[in-house]
Amino acid sequence: MNQPQFVEVSSRDNPLIKDLRKLVQVASHSRKLGRFWVEGEHLCQAALAHDWVPQIALFAQSAWASSLCSLGQSAHKTVVVPDALFHTVSALESSASIGFVMELPKAAAIQAGVASVILDRVQDPGNVGSILRSAAAFGFRQVIALKGSANVWNAKVLRAGMGAHFGLHLVEGVEPHMLEALGLPLIVTSSHQGRSLHHQQLPWPCAWVLGHEGQGIQETLLSRASLTVRIAQPGGEESLNVAAAAAICLHASAIAQA
């Protein structure tokens, strides 16, 4: 087994720093390099807790001099830079002083029979990250993103997911017909159709379909749904944010199968 590398860098023109800056700040660069960036103690710890191995652990000197240095022990390469240089790489207004470069997972196939959340062209990164977080919290171990959904490894999605990514089976670029492989009843929500969620017996395992922020769920999926439920909204709002609706529905499933 090769010994992990340790490097100290002080120049902003160092090729490694330039590559890291592109990876963090240019969204398309992640796909090109097959890597993604996670920043901050919480996300780094979440990755390690699920046995993900960092390709590179980047530390600001202040973090390296603290107990945070232990987070870099499993990385293939550890890089320590002055705090000011770390800030030029960071994607955050107030940088966290530690970040990991992780290898993008290989394209995954749908796992049959696994309780799932299906993203039907959900495009806002904050919504996608929040939905992943709810999925992990309420026992849904697979998230399937149909074509047109936000990249689940987008930096904003990662931050909103708060570490949920690392414990989920994530499948991207799926066409609707490919959902046949799931072998589970599809459940959809409507603001005006179906029986009230809290008066409905929910199947388990199941797959909840969550639709585009403006257009909702596409007709091909609505026609294949085994169940349509309505979330009670006594306040009279027209509809809920998709991430809020997801949390309500996934929680209802968790209670039903507890």
Image (tube, rainbow, N blue to C red):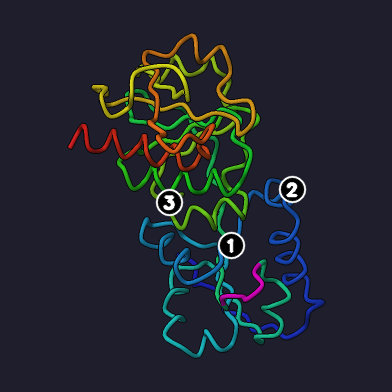
Of residues 67 and 143, the one drawn nearer to the viewer in this rendering: 143
Residue that badge 2 annotates? 28
Task: Identify which amino acid the numbered label 3 is placed on.
Answer: Ala
Indicate the position of residue 253 as horizontal and vertical percent values. 28, 33
Indicate the position of residue 188 as horizontal and vertical percent values. 44, 22
Above or below, 69 relative to 249: below
Above or below, 140 relative to 64: above
Of residues 5 and 153, the one drawn nearer to the viewer in this rendering: 153
Q: Are marks 3 and 2 in contact (CB under 8 Å)?
A: no
Judged by depth in the image, the label closer to the viewer, 3 or 2, is 3
User: Which comes before the other along the chain, label 3 or label 1?
Assistant: 1
- Horizontal side, residue 222 vs residue 154: left or right: left
Distance of label 2 from label 1 (alpha carbons)? 15 Å
Task: Identify which amino acid the numbered label 1 is placed on.
Answer: Val
User: Which comes before the other along the chain, label 3 or label 2?
Assistant: 2
Judged by depth in the image, the label closer to the viewer, 3 or 1, is 3
SS state under label 3: helix
Residue that badge 1 annotates? 101
How dense is the environment of label 2, judged by Cα within 10 Å: few (below 14), some, or many (20 and up)? Answer: few
- Residue found at the very far right of the displayed protein: 13
Above or below, 203 relative to 4: above
Q: Is residue 228 visible?
A: yes
